[in-house]
Image (cartoon, rainbow, N blue to C red):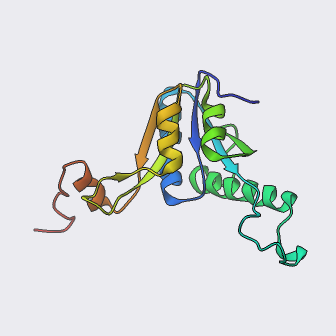
Amino acid sequence: MAEGAGNSIVVGVDGSQASLAALRWAAAQARSTHLEVVAVHAWERAGAGFAPYAPAPVRPTTAEQRAEAAHVLAGAVRTVFGPDPGGAVRQVVREGPPARVLLEQARGALLLALGHGIGVQRDLPALGAVGRACVRAATVPVVTVPYGPPATLLKAVGMSPGPRRGAA
């Protein structure tokens, strides 16, 4: 089991805009503090979503699922770091429940970064089940990075947007 080193920021990446925001935050933090970014994508075998009588070609194989997970992570890393990330990020794809995988990978890291959206009630942060499980059980600090429309994010932290550019 590869665990984060004390000089790393482990980031949960699922391909969502929220996880891309967390990956961008971690990349900027790592550049300024000379830390390693460890981008982690956890995946679980599909099966429950398919009827037992579904034809075998319809059900993805384990190898296909693993390849799709690697594709999702590589796409997210490419979006944030560009086509050639070099040594700026280490990519980890692991099978298993996301919270468990992230907590294992973050053990010994400097911190764990997760993205979250803004909830529909009172513009409060909306941390999903995986994020809540990580916050409850992490042995390292957890940073949650918000994603949402800028005005909503500012409102959620008690700020108001400034004048628009070009406005008199």
In depth, the one of 78 and 98 nearer the eye is 98
**Which residue: 83% across, 67% down?**
60
In the rendered structure, the answer to whether residue 11 lies left or right of residue 116 reads right
In the rendered structure, the answer to whether residue 41 lies left or right of residue 112 reads right
Q: In this view, which residue lies farthest toward the left? A: 168
59 relative to 123, above or below: below
Count how many numbered circles sit on residues in the image: 0
The answer to whether residue 81 shows anywhere in this view is yes
In the rendered structure, the answer to whether residue 19 lies left or right of residue 124 reads right
In depth, the one of 31 and 160 nearer the eye is 160
Q: Quadrant of the N terminus?
A: top right
Q: Quadrant of residue 102?
A: top right
78 relative to 39, above or below: below
In depth, the one of 28 and 5 nearer the eye is 5
Q: Quadrant of residue 3?
A: top right
**Which residue: 84% across, 77% down?**
53
Where is residue 148 drawn, in percent x and y?
38, 60
Where is residue 136 drawn, in percent x and y?
47, 34
**Which residue: 30% across, 53% down?**
124
**Which residue: 47% across, 28% down?**
141
Where is residue 27 drawn, in percent x and y?
53, 41
Q: In this view, which residue lies farthest toward the front? A: 52
Q: Quadrant of the C terminus?
A: bottom left
Where is residue 111 drawn, in percent x and y?
52, 30
The answer to whether residue 24 shows anywhere in this view is no
